[in-house]
Image (cartoon, rainbow, N blue to C red):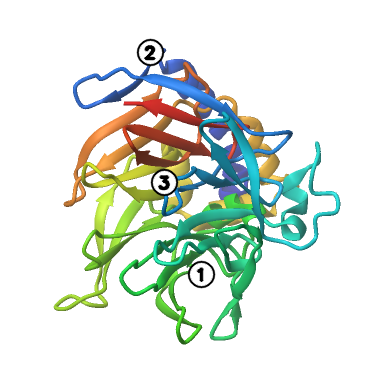
Amino acid sequence: MASKLIFTLILPVLLSALVIVNFFSQASHVLESYSGNKIGLLETVPLVGSAMGPESFAFDPLGGGPYTGVSDGRVVKWLEHERRWTDFATTSPNRDGCAGPNDHQSREHICGRPLGLKFNVSNGDLYITDAYMGLLKVGSQGGLATRIATHEQGLPLAFTNSLDIDQSGGAVYFTDSSSRYHRRNYISVILSGDKSGRLMRYDPESQEVNLLVGNLSFPNGVALSKDGDFILLVETTNCRVMRYWLKEPKAGTLEVFAQLQGFPDNIKRSPRGGYWVGIHSRKEKVLDLVLSHPWIGNALLKLPIDVMKAHAALAKFRGSGLAVRLSEEGEVLETFEDRHGKGLMSISEVMEKDGNLWIGSVTSPFAARYYI
């Protein structure tokens, strides 16, 4: 027991050292998307005011956008011809103190934190997964979104994260990353080895939420296959993408689709085939040790330190932003990496549209556009 205590006390120091070493070991200073070393042009698109964290993107049925959710609880729309963002929707009716240079993270449960976005192409409704407000939707004119699901079988949605829509029938597939922790404590979900996450389906006709898979380790991004046979599910803690079959003969089967080199966030279909996966950070050896022994992570959470602030402090030493495009069989086709030259870190999503990669990050005050 004494050895465990000593190890727990020195672990933050070891982790800090490893992150710093990783940062300075990166030699290259280029931004590239490589399956053949293609170099493209990167544009940063700053957000308005003090808003941060464009997590995910969506384009409306007419091709307008992208739309993205930001840290102060708004969903904003990019107006390409005017080169500016405009307000489109909010997820909470309480906007007092939400705007301006505030600590948005401490007010997420009041102002809302929209994460996943997807339009229903048949009627123009935008569905939103808000980390605190649950599953919502808003019409094509925007405004205050309506909450349509906040529980599953009586269990509250504590960390609603990502979604995709079956456009043929309107069913919404979405994740709740944890039943124990909220988004503002997402590092605790990983360190504790929490397995209370869920994948669910919302039926707009019956207005019912059904559980598809439970006991998941930080379920995050979701993406339906092109023909709707299966849905891909990111499991962040385990650094992998899972495949859940929706149709026979494998209906109800869950299997590993791809194992990744870091902690994945969102997943989106690519118009060129396959799926883009944004990777928050690489999986270092010390953190791998922590995840292999849950008692270490739980001991860290009991120390008199704020793990979220410690994580934020170490983030500036983190290496490059990373994303991969997977094939229909889960093989890596293409890797996108900013080798700490352009400030792209903690990539949450890559969405490909009209020859552009729109790149999101929960830690950045801008969205990024990469011209392929």
Q: Is residue 315 above or below residue 162?
A: above
Q: Which mark is residue 116?
A: none
Q: Residue at x 30, y 70 (%)?
A: 168
Image quarter for residue 189?
bottom right
| Apparent side of residue 250 relative to residue 18 in the rendered image (left or right) | left
First reached walking from the N terminus: tag 2 or tag 1: 2
| Secondary element at tag 2 | loop
Q: CA distance from mark 2 to mark 3?
A: 36 Å
Residue 8: % across, % down: 60, 45
First reached walking from the N terminus: tag 2 or tag 3: 2
- Mark 3: few, some, or many residues within 10 Å (few <14, many ≥20)? few
Residue 36: % across, % down: 19, 22
- Mark 1: few, some, or many residues within 10 Å (few <14, many ≥20)? some
Total numbered circles: 3
User: According to the image, label 2 marks what residue?
Assistant: 28
Are the residues at dot 3 and dot 1 in contact (C-beta closer than 8 Å)?
no
| Residue 311 seen by the camera | no
| Apparent side of residue 228 relative to residue 119 in the rendered image (left or right) | left
Q: Residue at x 38, y 13 (%)?
A: 28
User: According to the image, label 3 marks what residue?
Assistant: 63
Residue 81: % across, % down: 52, 31
| Apparent side of residue 343 relative to residue 249 in the rendered image (left or right) | right
Q: Nearer the viewer, residue 256 or 228?
A: 228
| Secondary element at tag 3 | loop
Q: Nearer the viewer, residue 55 or 194?
A: 55
Q: Nearer the viewer, residue 185 or 369?
A: 369
User: According to the image, label 1 marks what residue?
Assistant: 196
| Apparent side of residue 13 relative to residue 190 in the rendered image (left or right) | right
Residue 214: % across, % down: 43, 74
First reached walking from the N terminus: tag 3 or tag 1: 3
Q: Nearer the viewer, residue 274 or 67?
A: 67
